[in-house]
Image (spheres, rainbow, N blue to C red):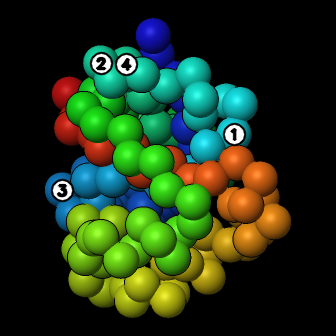
Amino acid sequence: MTHEMKLQPKYYEFILNGTKRIEIRLFDEKRQEIKIGDTIKFLKEPELNESFEANVVGLLRYNSFDDMFKDFNISTLADDSMTKEELKSVLEEFYTKEKQSQYGVLGIRIELI
């Protein structure tokens, strides 16, 4: 199955450059559909006219971003140009602590196709 996800330009480039190897999302209904072996088509915001595809090679379930961040370096979750606190702040703009408590979070291990 192929899924589509939008990415801000910075994170789009981090994946293409090979630094970001885990895409982080809320484990909501849409993400519960993702399985190992699926493909994700990432679309670069805001125009959505650039894209690439990656294979899902692992799924990591956590209760919160804080829990996930204990297990990984920023170089795997984004890029060394950011701190974990900066990344968490960006994620929580989209996914509140309440939503994290409701659904949990998902780390999607990906490999570029």
Mark 2 or mark 3: name the one nearer the start of the chain: 3
Residue 29 can be seen in this image: yes
Label pair 4/2, CB-CB below 8 angstroms: yes
Q: How far apart are labels 2 and 3 at the CA level? A: 19 Å
Mark 3 or mark 1: name the one nearer the start of the chain: 3
Look at mark 1 in the image and give the residue it sits on: 28
Is 103 left or right of 37, judged from the image as shown?
right
> Which image quarter is the C terminus in?
top left
Label pair 3/1, CB-CB below 8 angstroms: no
Is 108 left or right of 55, judged from the image as shown?
right
Image location (x, y in percent) of residue 100: 69, 60
In the displayed structure, would residue 23 be above or below residue 36? below
Label pair 2/3, CB-CB below 8 angstroms: no
Q: Secondary structure at mark 2?
A: loop
> Which image quarter is the N terminus in?
top left
Q: How far apart are labels 1 and 2 at the CA level? A: 19 Å
Q: How far apart are labels 3 and 1 at the CA level? A: 26 Å
2 or 3: mark nearer the eye:
2
Image location (x, y in percent) of residue 17: 20, 58
Residue 54 can be seen in this image: no
Q: Secondary structure at mark 4?
A: loop
Label pair 1/4, CB-CB below 8 angstroms: no
In the displayed structure, would residue 6 be above or below residue 73? above
Look at mark 3 in the image and give the residue it sits on: 18
Residue kind at label 2, given as amino acid type: Gly
Label pair 1/2, CB-CB below 8 angstroms: no
Look at mark 2 in the image and give the residue it sits on: 37
Mark 4 or mark 3: name the one nearer the start of the chain: 3
Crowding at mark 2 (Cα within 10 Å: few <14, some 14-19, many 20+): some
4 or 3: mark nearer the eye:
4
Look at mark 4 in the image and give the residue it sits on: 38
| Residue shown at the point (67%, 30%) measured from the top left | 30
